Amino acid sequence: MLRIAAFLVACLTWMTPASAQQADAPIQQLLQTHSEILLKSSRRTIGPAVDALANSGLPEAQTVLERWQNKEMWVDEDSGLFVYAEEVDRDTLRIFDFADGSEIGVVPDDGFDQLKPNSGIRGMIGTALVQFQLSDPDPANRATALDAIERGAEESHLAALRASIPTEQDEALLQRKMRLERLLTIRYGQTDAERIEAIQHFDGDLGVDVRAALNPLLAVRVEAAEALPEDPDIGRVLQPGSEALSRDDAYALLVSADLAQPRISRADKRAALVANIDGGQVAGVQVATLDTEAARDMAYAALAEQGVVEAVATEAEVDERVANHVFFERFIGAPPEVVVAAQLALASIENKVALNQAVDLSLDALSLASIYFLAAIGLAITFGVMGVINMAHGEFIMMGAYTGYVVQLFIPDYTLSILVAIPLAFMVTFGAGVTMERLVIRWLYHRPLETLLATFGISIALQQIAKNIFGTQARPLTAPGWLDGSLVINDIVSISYIRIAIFVLALLFLALFLFVMNRTRLGLEVRAVTQNPRMAASMGINPDKINMLTFGFGSGIAGIAGVAIGLYAKVTSEMGSDYIVQSFMTVVVGGVGNIWGTLLGATMVGFLQKGIEWLNPSNTLAAQTYMILFIILFIQFRPKGIIALKGRAAEA
Amino acid sequence: MSDVALGSARRPFALRFPSVLVFLAILSIFTVVVTVLSEGFGVGVISTSFVKTLGKTLCLCLVALAMDLVWGYCGILSLGHMAFFGLGGYAIGMWLMYARTEIIVLESLAAAELPPTPEEVSDGIATQIFGVVGASEFPPIWAFAHSLPLQLAAVVVVPGLLALVFGWLAFRSRVTGVYLSILTQAMTLALSLHLFQNDSGLRGNNGLSGLQNLPGLSDVPQSIVSMWFFWASALALGLGYILCAWVVSGKFGSVIRAIRDDEARVRFLGYPVEAFKLVIFTLTAVIAGIAGALYYPQAGIVNPAEIAPIASIYLAVWVAIGGRGRLYGAVIGAAFVSLLSTWFTGGQAPDINLGFYTIQWVDWWIVILGLSFVAVTLFAPKGIGGLVDVFIDRKSPDRHGADLGPDQGALREQEAEK
């Protein structure tokens, strides 16, 4: 049995060259020229082979590269000829000739070796393939090629790109190609003139890729010299000891340029001294006296005089050397004319970037202001209108957010669950607010300090109850899918839809508040009761009921705000206390008892915080700290807030 | 209430205020009993860790006294006194940490071939202390950390100065009542947020640690050291009590109580209300700082979470439960609530199994505390101290704890007298 099998295999092997392969076709010869490095398949040495294929101008080169990249290139072990092949089954190949793509035959794979390019080599092949793909009939392939160039541009792409532009039919792809051609020209253009022309095209362009192309042109090398050279490629002159060039760096530069003696670090000096201890002495100095850096310097100098160690510069010498030299930047990224053009273009770009960043920052600030406004609007009712200080307000926000979370547990559809959660959160916190008003607050009207204390107690208890029920970890409140992502205006200005939604919600609440207070019977009665409860009572208004409803209304709005805030921030039992101080600040800064004041207060606090964050971007804690300090100072100058009530309303 | 001093000005201070003598007597007996029962100096019934708890409680009583002075007597509901307390802890903690690290660094450098230079020592200490926040240089605020006297001065000066500046700004612009409370809360929040930053120079949220080890006294066992701190805390509390009792007696005390009851009227009578309030605010801040400086070496660690606004709120809770407007009330409240808190949150209290749910006191104690605080505010505004009135037969009408004054529901003067 085994013999029969062996015989069959032998027959097959003998039959192998089913049709003759064109061993002298130009592509095959090219492959044979580089046969050795192709077979070695090492990323470091493969370069010439890939380049030779890419630049050969042979129509078959693209096929070779593609097959190679897909691990479909095989080599005949006997003849050393390259073919591409499809695997018919595990042991059998259908091989093809590169020269004309004709099938050679179906053969067992014993006599063939597969070329297995590793991922590094495949990347190089991919780069080389780009120039073929740029003129591919399929627009999708052309787009892929452009993507590849954007990711990793090479000098060779420029010519290929230019060659492909005249034949490009697709308008969008043509635009991309031209833009990419200019970017590549900036980087690899042959003459300064064409580079400068390309640079000028990008005046005020906000694209990140443009800045990425321009910035390397402005690369500098810091150099030192006795006197400033008059070369045209000299940038700015640096002062040693300034922020751009510290004294130590300046001296290190001199040392590396062999213009000065090296310095020695404290640890090295110590090691050198220790190495030269001789009978309790270093260069004649008692070891016990070496307990200051000055004494060690002297001992080291003595050692240097003896020639035991290298002489090093003293601090005075360092100062002298640094003072005797001038430090300057030399442009090494491009010739001077190109640098000038790039500087001009970058300056115009930066102006535009700054403008757009300001817009972006304002949008951020506006959305933060909306959040503060949302958190504070309930307080504007309970504290601003009724004068009841409710420290558990933050916990009402938390209750609203947890209501949203619980609703999402039962209703998996996020859009629907939010629509259910908003009225439900209002009801839950309205109920909680009314209960609290009935049980606690109504006994404490006119005694604000006691109200503050009692509501603190409630706040502590509510927080802990939430912690006991929901645990300490943050719970997710997921926004519906249509709120994902952000509105991108350009590379710099963008705002997430969820922030827009919160902004819209804040406006809605403002409208709701104004409508209820100014246009409804309830609002009229609320205003009457807050101004003069006894008079209101004699007009047939029940102040108890009004107080209860007003407090419930304020608490309910806090609940809805909680849902909105939960969508944007984390839902934890402590989220309320994160907002309570800021909310009170918003109300107090704006002016108690006036909704427009609250709006202004929220805007001011939001813009301030974002502004401070912009000045010190690494540190949001610092921003909050400084903002609170600012508010404390602000209250010094306008104790009644931005909009102070006047006349009878102020006395209520 | 023993603080109505009119008409008895000639008699000695101690006789006019028997409650001070009673308090000092109880405190001394308590100190002696604890000493006798302690591990360090007595029969060893009370463990060292419990001695520390008692010592810390005495410090909390001291800061509660300060809170009572500023809130119960002067009517300023400050939510910043635990911040002053924490600052005192930080001030002493800086020295403790510096000095102890210095000893460690000197020991490790002593083995080296060359005697250490000051620069090497300072670099070594800085690397040890600030390694956790990725820094290796001393921030400027550590300039005096090497000196015990200067850091002791800082215990008093830093909280005092902060209170002085903040109080001056706040009182000057007539911020009163709840606005002042919120403002002090904002100050506390700002301070704790600042300290939470790693580049605040005070090791960010790591805080200062290892404070229970006194530099140079590593041979003395903790059982002895804890007693030293216990005595110091008891002494500070005793002295603080005398000081507070003295401040609220006499004319000064009458004026600050008058400010509490009706600030505008006192101003019309020609008193510089702002100056009185500023003195009280600063004095109590200093007392809080001292209490903190005694507390944190016993606690062993001080970090920004201790300064967060909630701590100051708890301070108000203690004083309210104990009974504000009377000094012993603050002490009783702080001792009672903080010891009870330790007991409940320490896991010693037995869980209650209801069948369907097990009440774990670690989780539910805070809820009880919060709600009982509401209950005290509503139903027992005099707090635990009010029980004393029952014994000494002092009755006054139930006005829901209102202070003396013209407001609706407030206590009339003749009602308060009897």
Image (cartoon, coloured by chain):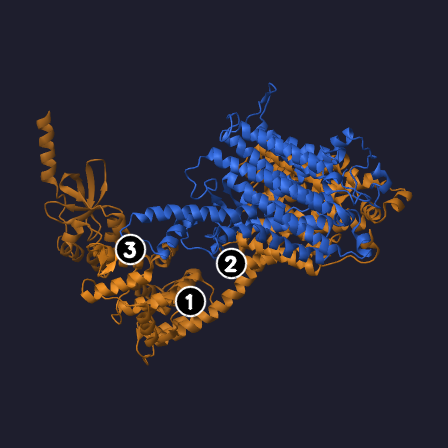
**Mark found first going from the N terminus, 3 or 2:** 3
Task: Identify the mark at residue A288; answer none if there is no mark.
Answer: 3
Question: Which shade is chain B?
Answer: blue
Q: Quadrant of the N terminus of chain B?
A: top right
Between B255 and A15, which is closer to the camera in this rendering? B255
Q: Residue at x 41, y 60 (%)?
A: A173
User: A265 above or below A652?
Assistant: below
Amino acid type at mark 1: Glu
Q: Residue at x 42, y 72 (%)?
A: A343
Label 2, residues with CA under 10 Å away: few <14, some 14-19, many ≥20: few
Label 1, residues with CA under 10 Å away: few <14, some 14-19, many ≥20: few
**Would residue B110 be found to the left or right of residue A342 on screen?**
left
Q: What residue is pinned by disc 1?
A: A243
| Nearest-to-viewer mark from 3 and 2 | 3
Amino acid type at mark 3: Ala
Q: Quadrant of residue A168?
A: bottom left
Q: Position of residue B363 (x, y in %)?
A: 58, 30
Helix, strand or loop at label 2? It is: loop
User: Is the residue at mark 3 from the same chain as the one at mark 2?
Assistant: yes
Helix, strand or loop at label 1? It is: loop
**Mark found first going from the N terminus, 3 or 1:** 1
Q: What residue is pinned by disc 2?
A: A616
Amino acid type at mark 2: Asn
Q: Are marks 3 and 2 in contact (CB under 8 Å)?
A: no
The reply to whether residue A366 is in sight is no
Question: Which shade is chain A?
Answer: orange
Q: Chain of mark 3?
A: A
**Mark found first going from the N terminus, 2 or 1:** 1
**Would residue B8 be found to the left or right of residue A259 on screen?**
right
